[in-house]
Amino acid sequence: MEFHKTEKPLRGEITIPGDKSISHRSVMFGAISQGTTEITNFLQGQDCLSTISCFRKMGIEIENTSERILVHGRGLHGLTAPTEILDVGNSGTTTRLISGILAGQDFTSELTGDASIQKRPMGRIIKPLSMMDATIESIKGNGCAPLRISGHALKGIHYQSPVASAQVKSSILLAGLYADGKTSVTEPALSRNHTEIMLRSFGATVTSEGTTASILPDPDLHGQKIEVPGDISSAAYFIVAALIVPGSEILIKNCGINETRDGILRVCRAMGADITVLNAHTSGGEAVADLLVRYTPDLKGCVIEGDIIPTLIDEIPVIAVLAAFADGTTTIRNAEELKVKESNRLDIMVHHLSEMGCDITGTEDGMIINGGKTLQGAVLDSFLDHRIAMSFAIASLACESTLTIRRADCVNISYPAFYQDLERLCR
Ligand SMILES: O=C(O)C1=C[C@@H](OP(=O)(O)O)[C@@H](O)[C@H](O)C1
Ligand SMILES: C=C(OP(=O)(O)O)C(=O)O
């Protein structure tokens, strides 16, 4: 797919699609609750559709119309053994969270996904779920999917997680629903807390203290009405686009700004970006607002490291694009998790931005970007990673010649209408 420098600034309003993390969770928690869960603004991306498909294979009736999703839950012990292998597609969130639920079932199941999923590390959930007494194995013995999980009565544990990962934390907390006592997880820095917020609203006893989250077993979970806020990880592309294209001014409506997800806003502020938060309110326990973003000509580089990293982990590729257009140096540290996402996002961003003429150096756990140079087009592969494709579509808006992105349609994972929405704002 070919992209060209935009002739016009970005203008107008955009309501971005529902949050991917929250969409996944709403289906999963609905499936193991009593009664019906009604979800609006559900993200109809391929990852969340994989979650729906897995639960349908375990006997859960899920109605999906463009208006809303109805999940007819069957309670904590209502799932049935799948008659075929569960296909998680490209979705790490589906893989790790569903494993926590499967660990507590009295049947054996197998799950697998695409080539990318089969390379992502699952030892990080195999270890704590095994400590809880689940039998969970990597079928090929390489610590990755396909996984075989034989669940049974589980033991509550306290787990000190070596990574700040909401997928690991959530997997353990979900298994904790089926344990014989309290289960808690402490992580090195606080990761996104949607599981804690939403499980509480379904009726679970979940407490959070600093970087420790705990859950009590065997609650009565009840179906809920959930309005999914817009995904700040998707909004990130338009935020960066508006900041780097001269004359732009856009209003991003109904965007989730949960403080475990809003790192990109804090980084933009540190770089001097013109962003105003309007109409801030809470919906279903989640902070939501409209974001007014205006072109900012004199953006400055900054240092991004430490506890802020988990709050912007999926935004780092597009933040690297922003840094390439800012003056001065941006240093990103402690972001080694990016190597084990859908692709090795550190290596690919460094390689692709260099191809475009950016002064960028990769480090062990991040990158150093000396911004402000004029960028040129190039021919770049997405490596089938949606966030790589979207980041370079944004870079193309302000680079000097044609940029070609190979295998650009992988955006359907998290944002099927991404190119149409971008084009509309540039019209
Ligand atoms: O829990 C979630 O919904 C997610 C957690 C993050 O992964 P990790 O938990 O592996 O950091 C993030 O990268 C992913 O896109 C979604
Ligand atoms: C890492 C991501 O998702 P997942 O881990 O669910 O595949 C992402 O969406 O950037």
Image: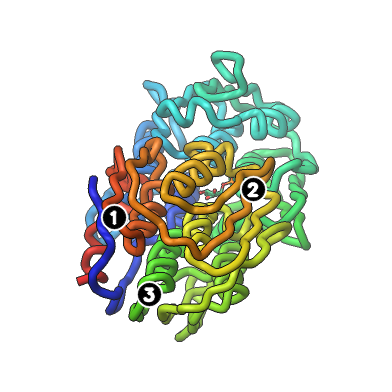
Q: Residue type at mark 3?
A: Ile
Q: Residue type at mark 2?
A: Gly
Residue 349 position, x and y percent, is 50, 46
SS at mark 2 in the image: strand
Of labels 2 and 1, the one closer to you: 1
Answer whether residue 60 is visible to the viewer in this image: no
Q: Which residue is mark 2?
A: 366
Mark 3 nearby-residue class (10 Å; few <14, some 14–19, many ≥20): many
Quadrant holding the N terminus? top left
Residue 249 position, x and y percent, is 35, 81
Q: Specify whether 146 is left or right of 339.
A: left
Of labels 3 and 2, the one closer to you: 2
Q: CA distance from mark 1 to mark 3?
A: 28 Å
Q: Tag 3 or tag 1, which sits nearer the N-term? A: 3
Q: Specify whether 122 is left or right of 53.
A: right
SS at mark 1 in the image: loop
**Residue 279 or 418: which is nearer the viewer?**
418
**Residue 90 or 421: which is nearer the viewer?**
421
Answer whether residue 332 is visible to the viewer in this image: yes
What residue appears at the point 57 percent right and 63 percent down from the top-left corner?
261
Q: Tag 1 or tag 2, which sits nearer the N-term? A: 2
Question: Of the numbered discs in the image, which one, if any, rests on residue 401?
Answer: 1
Q: Which residue is mark 3?
A: 252
| Ligand 2 neighbours mark 1 (CB distance < 8 Å) | no
